[in-house]
Image (cartoon, rainbow, N blue to C red):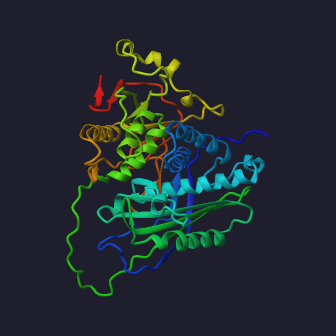
Amino acid sequence: MSAPGIWRTEKKVTVSGHTRHRHKPSPISSGFEAPAPNTTLVFGPSALAASIARTATLRNAPPEMLARWGDSALTQVEWLVEDGAAFALSQHLHVLADAERTSFAGRVGAGITDLLMNALGFTWRDNASCLSSSLAPHADFIYADGAVSRHGVVLAEAHGSFAASVSSAGVTREAKHKYLRQVRPHLATASPHGKVVHGYSIAFGSRPGAAGAFLHVAETLISKPRSRRPPPSQTAPTASPAAAPTSLALAAHRSNFAIMDAPSIVRWIDWVRGGRERSDDMQPSLFVRIPYAGRVFLCSMEMAWPFGGYPEWLDEFWHPRWWPPIRPARTLPRGRDDFAGWFAMEEKAAESFLNALSAIVRNGRDNLPESLELPSLDPAGFGFGGDEAGLRSPAASEYRYALYRDGLALLGSPPPSRMVGQRMWIPREGMRTD
């Protein structure tokens, strides 16, 4: 079977349905307003691959394992999604076992949900397993920031289906059913990350062999007041616009640095979260600075130097010409039209978080701050299309990449070929520039 053309064109998926479900009280948090719905989700291959990796790596598995899980998302998207503006599945999906097709559909459903939630303005994320210690059904993910800042968190349930029987009515039915079963029971309840004040159930489906997809969004209805009298005055909790809930920022960046192949940073995050003993290893984590698409990204060199400890001689002899022989294998072409991908972090976002992490290492985890001052970036590589004011699809350029609000990026083709220096993170000291 010949390989289909690699996916290059941005996909445009129309939101085929949007339903709202009543809840009392409404809104759950006074003053909360949900983001306005939109009609078209636009995304490239790097964005879908990165979102599949982001959603698959939110549990507390070993970071080395999660890095491989993140890599697998690149392979899946490369081989199983056809090129073209309309969403279509590759012919290779037909030769997979039924269980593999079902699993891939679920992964894509989770990735589409992550893209949509980021496009709506939500930044920080965690797996929603923290909602219940039992086997009771619950939503897949928790998000914060954006419209829900200073109010609490929102839930997101994801569903994906790739079958000959997929239809608009069936996708709508799944979105509504999962909202009622896995989202609504947890509204207005407390979570480790804050009160749940809103919820989404997002279902995505496509028929193999046919171009096009169905996307339905079910969410909590926010009732409008019946009169124009102002609501009772309440004192809202004060917070900086850049204040990220510490628990969610740690969960999100644990996933980020795991798929970036920086396991030593993940182990420090685990210590802060109370999941392991304090490490005596104060060895620095090394990053290289890569200019790309008008920004500078930090790429981990931790797994590219497998001998343990930091090679002091590297400070003296560091030069870009040494880069090709020692760069991680994951950045090399994957065999089809130079398709490549490298997870990285926007430099300012990485510096802000790692300096905050060092402050916690120095001061101890017993007095963990409720929030961290972290930036929220404008995403790239995906967004809302259509006629919505202020929401435009990403502009075409020579760069194929995805950038998320928390700073994580997946750099696609052309692969990075130039460096502008290096940086180190020292656990007790923070980020250092040499």
Q: Where in the figure is residue 174, as x and y percent of width and height? A: 61, 69
Residue drawn at x 60%, y 31% as measured from the top left: 338
Check the image and report above or below for 341 versus 48: above
Q: In this view, does 421 lie to the left or right of 341?
A: left
- Specify whether residue 197 is in view: yes
Name the quadrant of the N terminus.
top right
Q: In this view, does 343 lie to the left or right of 289?
A: right
Residue drawn at x 23%, y 68% as measured from the top left: 236
Q: Which residue lies furthest to the bottom in this view?
A: 227
272 or 109: nearer the viewer: 272
Check the image and report above or below for 65 versus 227: above
Q: Where in the figure is residue 261, as x and y percent of width and height? A: 48, 34
Name the quadrant of the C terminus.
top left
187 or 408: nearer the viewer: 187
Check the image and report above or below for 233 versus 4: below
Q: How many labels does the image show?
A: 0
Query: Residue 35 sits in which quadrant?
Result: bottom left
Q: Where in the figure is residue 391, as x and y percent of width and height? A: 42, 58
Query: Residue 69 sits in which quadrant?
Result: top right
Q: Residue furthest front?
A: 277
Check the image and report above or below for 209 versus 69: below
Q: Where in the figure is residue 331, as x and y percent of width and height? A: 54, 30
- Specify whether residue 213 is in view: no
